[in-house]
Every structure is written in C-alpha cells, then in structure tokens.
Amino acid sequence: MIEALKDDKIITMVGGRFRLCALIQRRLVQLMEGARPMIERDGRSDLEVVVAEIMDGKLTAELDYSDPEVKAAMPLEAKAALAAARGK
C-alpha cells in the first residue's frame, strides 16, 4: 500500500477524494500513453509516481471547465451550478 494514500493530507491537498481519484486517473492515462514523469521513477510503479508527483506539489487538480471531457463527466447539478455562476 502506498503510505501517502493512508493519510488525509493528500486528499486535502487536491480538494477532496473525487478530485484525487480523477487526478490520479488522468495522470495514469498520460503516463501509460508515454508522458514523462515529473520526478525520478527510481523503480516505482506508475501509481507510486503519480502519488509522489502530487505530494511534491508538481501535479495539481485544476480543472479546465471548458474541456469537453470535463464537462461530460460533470454531474447535472454541477453543470447547472457552473452555468448559474457564469450567468447563463
């Protein structure tokens, strides 16, 4: 088990469990598609690399709400709240 995932610090750093899961998933896909790690791999798995990148502050959970993939994954309530905040 990756020790950092046992602590709530990583959850707080990214703003919640959902954001953490989404961030890890998105970065894992990037690594599997050939993206370079932002830290030294040192024999670690892709998941361990992603967690280390988050803990080192090299990876954050900033969402681009104009991205069609992000919009498609949003629950209807979140889409309505975003539209209301933008005055639409």
Image: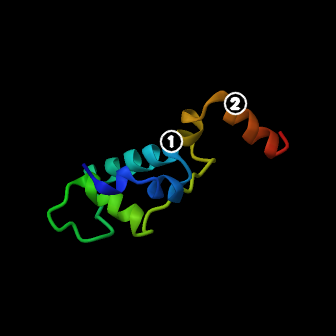
Q: Nearer the viewer, residue 68 or 11?
A: 11
Which residue appears at 40% of the width and 47% of the height? Answer: 26
Earlier sequence position, callout 2 versus callout 1: 1
- Quadrant of the rendered image containing residue 54: bottom left
Residue type (three-letter) at the residue carrying disc 2: Glu
Above or below 31: residue 68: above
Q: Residues within 10 Å of mark 1 (few under 14, many from 20)?
A: few
User: SS of the residue at dot 2?
Assistant: helix
Residue 18, which numbered label?
A: 1
Please tell me the numbered disc located at residue 86: none
Residue 87 or 11: which is nearer the viewer? 11
Q: Position of residue 8 (x, y in %)?
A: 46, 53
Name the secondary structure under disc 1.
Answer: helix
Q: Is residue 64 left or right of residue 80?
A: left
Rendered residue at 63%/47% (across/down): 65
In this picture, residue 52 sits left or right of residue 60: left
Write the residue at 83% across / 39% down: 88
Q: Amino acid at mark 1?
A: Phe
